[in-house]
């Protein structure tokens, strides 16, 4: 579905952010992108939707080579890719519902969006998504009145209203506490399964990547140094990605503190989360 071929990015300063990235992501797969700061994780995600222009190589989504597009054709192709941001990217003065509806801006005309006149079926879908992410009670709240976890849920609902084929997720748990981080990662995984979405998640938390991703790709200095299943990510590979550390000791300590298992069936509702919200 998504194919990156010989993707490279060199900035005007001469810094090489990505080197010869070859990657294929099938439909429905959740891929966690890990690596130290400066490894090129955010650059890779932004090269996919061309918020950052690749220096060379190609990005192909659903048979369409995005790196050959420009103008209107590129804008239309971007509809198939929705991004969930680390800092949420909500409009604080707008309500939760208005922020979610903005996920359809690429499909409605300027005046309809300016006057907030969305088709009824789109509004109904937005209501459904807000219920699904556990925020039916917050529809009329301003975005700046929400907690970090709630704001991230609004961003997830907005992305899904775009009806994408691919989710690009940039550090979704960076500003959240450990419990909320697990809830958000579980929600993203469940929604990907429900909507058959592929996802690339740039994440620093290796334990969350292991727990919720189908596949892990490790970057170091702009190159892929690991691509495999979460259970294959051992201490030696972590050392290759990040450098020397007592990985086995950290993993054992974290496991003793994290009894929760990701094996809960994906179709089970998030009743506990929906009832109390996320703070």
Image (tube, rainbow, N blue to C red):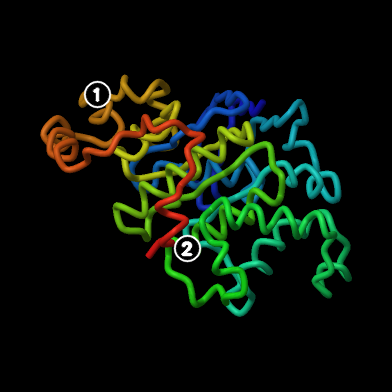
Q: Secondary structure at mark 2?
A: helix
Q: Secondary structure at mark 1?
A: loop
**Dot 1: within a 10 Å radius of its alpha carbon, few (fewer than 14), some, or many (20 or more) residues?**
few
The residue that disc 2 covers is 150
Q: Indicate the quadrant containing the C terminus: top left, top right, bottom left or bottom right.
A: bottom left
With 132 as the anchor, is 209 left or right in this view? Answer: left
Picture coordinates of residue 181 (x, y %)? 36, 51
Is 155 above or below relative to 39? below
Q: Which mark is in front, 1 or 2? A: 2
At x 40%, y 49%, the residue is 183
At x 47%, y 56%, the residue is 274
At x 60%, y 43%, the residue is 47
**Dot 2: within a 10 Å radius of its alpha carbon, few (fewer than 14), some, or many (20 or more) residues?**
many
At x 27%, y 39%, the residue is 260
With 255 as the anchor, is 133 left or right in this view? Answer: right
With 201 as the anchor, is 3 left or right in this view? Answer: right
Picture coordinates of residue 36 (x, y %)? 33, 43
With 231 as the anchor, is 161 left or right in this view? Answer: right
Picture coordinates of residue 81 (x, y %)? 67, 43
Q: In 3D space, how far apart are the residues under numbered discs 1 and 2 (Cα atoms)?
A: 34 Å
Is 172 above or below relative to 244? below
Work out whether residue 13 can be spotted.
yes
Is 6 above or below relative to 127? above
Q: Which image quarter: residue 45?
A: top right
Work out whether residue 12 can be spotted.
no
The residue that disc 1 covers is 234
Q: Indicate the quadrant containing the N terminus: top left, top right, bottom left or bottom right.
A: top right
Picture coordinates of residue 224 (x, y %)? 43, 28
Is 107 above or below relative to 205? below
């Amino acid at each position: 579905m998504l194919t990156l071929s010989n993707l490279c990015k060199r900035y005007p300063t001469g810094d090489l952010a990505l080197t010869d990235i070859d990657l294929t992501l099938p439909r429905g797969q959740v891929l966690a992108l890990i690596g130290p700061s400066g490894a090129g994780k955010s650059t890779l995600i932004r090269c996919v939707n061309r918020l950052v222009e690749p220096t060379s190589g190609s990005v192909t989504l659903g048979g369409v080579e995005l790196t050959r597009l420009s103008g209107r054709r590129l804008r239309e192709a971007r509809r198939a890719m929705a991004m969930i941001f680390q800092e949420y990217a909500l409009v604080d003065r707008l309500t939760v519902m208005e922020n979610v509806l903005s996920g359809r801006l690429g499909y409605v005309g300027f005046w309809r969006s300016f006057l907030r006149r969305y088709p009824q079926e789109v509004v109904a879908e937005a209501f459904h998504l807000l219920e699904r992410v556990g925020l039916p009670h917050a529809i009329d709240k301003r975005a700046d009145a929400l907690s970090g976890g709630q704001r991230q849920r609004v961003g997830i609902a907005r992305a899904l209203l775009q009806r994408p084929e691919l989710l690009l997720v940039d550090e979704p748990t960076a500003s959240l506490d450990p419990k909320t981080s697990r809830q958000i990662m579980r929600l993203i995984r469940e929604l990907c399964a429900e909507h058959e979405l592929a996802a690339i998640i740039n994440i620093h938390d290796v334990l969350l990547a292991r727990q919720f991703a189908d596949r892990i790709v490790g970057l170091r200095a702009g190159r892929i140094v690991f691509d495999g299943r979460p259970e294959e990510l051992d201490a030696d590979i972590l050392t290759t990605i990040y450098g020397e550390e007592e990985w086995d000791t950290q993993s054992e300590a974290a496991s003793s503190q994290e009894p929760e298992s990701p094996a809960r069936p994906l179709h089970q509702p998030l009743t506990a989360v929906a009832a109390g919200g996320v703070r």
